Every structure is written in structure tokens, then in C-alpha cells.
Amino acid sequence: MQSAQQDVAVVQSTAVTPSTVSTKGNIVPRRRFQKGSIVVKSDRYYGVFREDVLQSDGTFARKLRWLSLGLVKDMSGRAAWKALQPHLDKVNKDALRAPKTGVTLAEFVEEWRTSVSVNLKAGTVRVAESNLRAHILPKLGSLTLTEIDTKTVQSFVAYLAQGGRSRKTTTNVLATLSSIMRTARDWDYACASFQFSALTLPREGVKVEQRSFNDEETCRVITAAPETFSLILALTAVLGLRIGETLGLRIADIDFTKKLIRVRQSIDSATRKIGSVKSKASNADLPMPSQLETRLRSYLLKHDGKSELLFTNRSGRALCADKLREKLLHPLLDKLGIPRGGFHSLRHGAASALLADGATPAVVQRQLRHSDPRITLGIYGHVIGDQQRNAVQNRSARLVN
């Protein structure tokens, strides 16, 4: 330990040690283990050490740090060293797990695909890969992670907007980029940072209302559909299920005693693989109306019991939503003269009808199993319920002759 009577202390520094172990032949300075020094200046103990600070270009600069530890009259030299030690421990620990630099986004994406992407839901991976292939890698793939800062990402946003892409598309692409960059930082790669709040996104365009089947259209489709497909449509429309959730229903999920239908899993539309539902809130028990109970009891009497799934094809495999839409739903809509829509239009119709009938947003949220009530209001806020309509009608009757 250096004498506590010094006014000025010189921090000793050894020569830089070359290292080629982790840099594929490039000579870089290896960060040194810090022992630190105690200096007394103006009757106060200071801990002095050097720290490697990551720069915006991905290199490290060695900075001298002075840390005030306390007055000489209040503590001993031993106590000053004890106070400094946690800071030295942190500096030395950070030096051992130094961020890796010089990696391009395209190179890191390959690591992400190997270790992260394989654990995500199939639908999530498809969206991410689409964003990477069409937008992110062509424009940003050759840049190092330290070059992808707010300014660079803002230029990327401008590129997306010039291509006529909507604000929602831009936000989805940025979400993929942000998630990958966050993983890189978690893995101790040297990365620049960007904040959504610092970006200027494209303005909202004219909102296009989602296709939503009304009750009259839904009833006609359910009535005209073949028996099994009719039941699929009825479950989806009445309960407001996602089509993957309907096709993922098991016989064990039908509880006639408690009159419940349990939503626990979903079928991926492309791969037909069984997976978890969209979110924690999507995992729920829903009420079974008497009409559905009657139809389910009749259907199960004819079920061969070879699969735990409620609906399967002739080979016992899960049904494919894309094929059902192409081969059954759209031809049926065309035959009935009803404008085309997908299975999600049945879910939209369920929510819209519930709100129009006076159900509160909280009830609709529980039925559709949105994780946040703002999602329900954001999508279906345009629906005018009976209570609102009656209130406006009553006021109009008083004011307008």
C-alpha cells in the first residue's frame, strides 16, 4: 500500500501485452488487471485506477478514475482500501468479459438463428426472417454492430418510408432489429444503441377497417358449410377464437360437466405443428353455450378417437388453416355472394357483435383473451354499442324536429 501522506500519486502501468487469441490474428491490447492506488489529497482519501471505456467506434479508451472514499480523520488507510476494493473488483470483472467488437449484423444474425431463433414460435420466426430477408440485411447487414446507432436507424426508417411501407410495417421491422440488437448486447457484443422514442416514424395513413363478418353473414356461412367445417366455423365465430386455437382443441379440452372449453394450444398455419397459444392471457377457459354443447356432443359420437385432437384429416394429422381457407371458406363465400374474408374476420365479427350488444370492453377483452385492454379498444374502438346509440338517439329526439 502506498503511503497515506502523498499529495500526488502516479498510477503505475505495465506495457500493453499483445494478444491474438480471440481476434483471429489481429494484435490488440489486452486490458490489464487493476490493483489501484490510494491517494491523500486535501485531507481526503481517493482511490485511483484506470478503466477501459467502450467508444462509439467499438474501440476502448483507457480512462483515469478518481474515486472519493472519505476524510482522513474519519477512516484509516486500511478502511480506504476496503472501500475501494468493490470498485476494483467490478472493473476487473468487466475486463474479463469485454464486449466483442468488429462483428457485422449479418454475422451476428447467423449466431442468433442458431441459438435463439430455433426456440421461438414458428410464426414469430417467419415474421422475423421475412423482415431480415426483405429489409434489414440488405440495408444493414454489412454494418458492424457498433455502427447501427440512432442516426443509422433513422436513415433506415426513411428508406422504408420511401418504399411506401406503412407505419405498422416499419414498426414491425424495427421490433425485429431491436430484439436482435438487444440479444447482441446481452451476449457482451460491443453495440451502438438506438431508442424508439428518438426515431421519427412515418405518419399514420388512412386507417382501413378490418374485414368483419356480421352476424347475418356468419349465420349463412355456418348453415351452408359441411358438418365438420360448420362446427369449426361455429366455435371460431361464437367464442372469438383464433383459427389455430380452434384447430388445436383436444377432446380433453371439452368439459361438458362444467360447460367449459379450454384453450391450451394452437396449430401453426404453415407447419401444422402443435404449439402454445399466443400469450399467457390466451390460455383460458371459455363458456360453452348450449348450442355448441349440442353440436359437440353429436360430433364426438362420430369421432374415431384415434387422435386427441378434435379435428383431423383422414390421415389423423392436424388440419391446415391455409388449405381450409383456400379450399372451403373462400369458395363457400363466393357461392353465397358474401365478400371474402379470412378466419380472423370471424374473430373480429365476434368482438364487434359483443360490443354492439352492450358488452363492456373488459368482458370482450376476457373473451378474446387480449393481454392488454388497450388492444381491444384499439382494434374495436370504432364499434358503436346499443347504449351509445340509444343515448345519441334520445338527444337527437329532443333537439331535432
Image: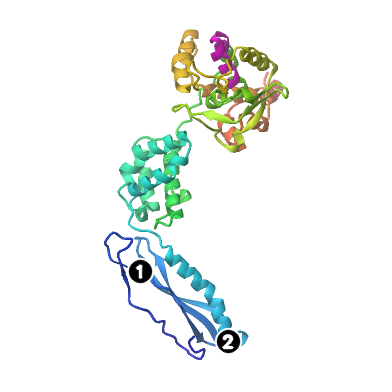
Q: Which of 283 and 96 is in front in this view?
A: 96
Label 1: which secondary element = loop
Q: Nearer the viewer, residue 209 or 292?
A: 292
Residue type at tag 2: Val
Picture coordinates of residue 283, whole percent (x, y) = 61, 33
Q: What stretch is highlighted in magenta?
A: 220-236
On screen, residue 129 versus residue 249, left or right, reads left
- Residue with the mark numbered 2: 72
Residue 221: within the magenta?
yes
**Which residue is at the far left?**
25
Residue 30: mark: 1
- Occupied quadrant, residue 166: top left
Q: Earlier in the sequence, mark 2 or mark 1?
A: 1
Picture coordinates of residue 173, whole percent (x, y) = 41, 40
Q: Which of marks 2 and 1 is in front?
A: 1
For residue 126, above or below residue 2: above
On screen, residue 182 versus residue 18, left or right, reads right
Label 2: which secondary element = helix
Picture coordinates of residue 14, whole percent (x, y) = 36, 78
Q: Tell me what residue is drawn at x 54 percent, y 14 percent.
A: 229
Picture coordinates of residue 307, whole percent (x, y) = 55, 21
Residue type at tag 1: Arg
From mark 2 to mark 1, how far is it between C-alphas?
A: 35 Å
Q: Tell me what residue is drawn at x 46 percent, y 33 percent.
A: 123
Q: Tell me what residue is drawn at x 46 percent, y 51 percent.
A: 195
**Which residue is at the far front?**
306
How many C-alpha atoms fall within 10 Å of the one at disc 2: few (<14), some, or many (≥20)?
Answer: some
Q: Tell me what residue is drawn at x 37 percent, y 66 percent.
A: 60
Q: Nearer the viewer, residue 110 or 362?
A: 110
Residue 83: mark: none
The answer to whether residue 259 of the structure is visible from this angle is yes
For residue 269, above or below residue 290: below
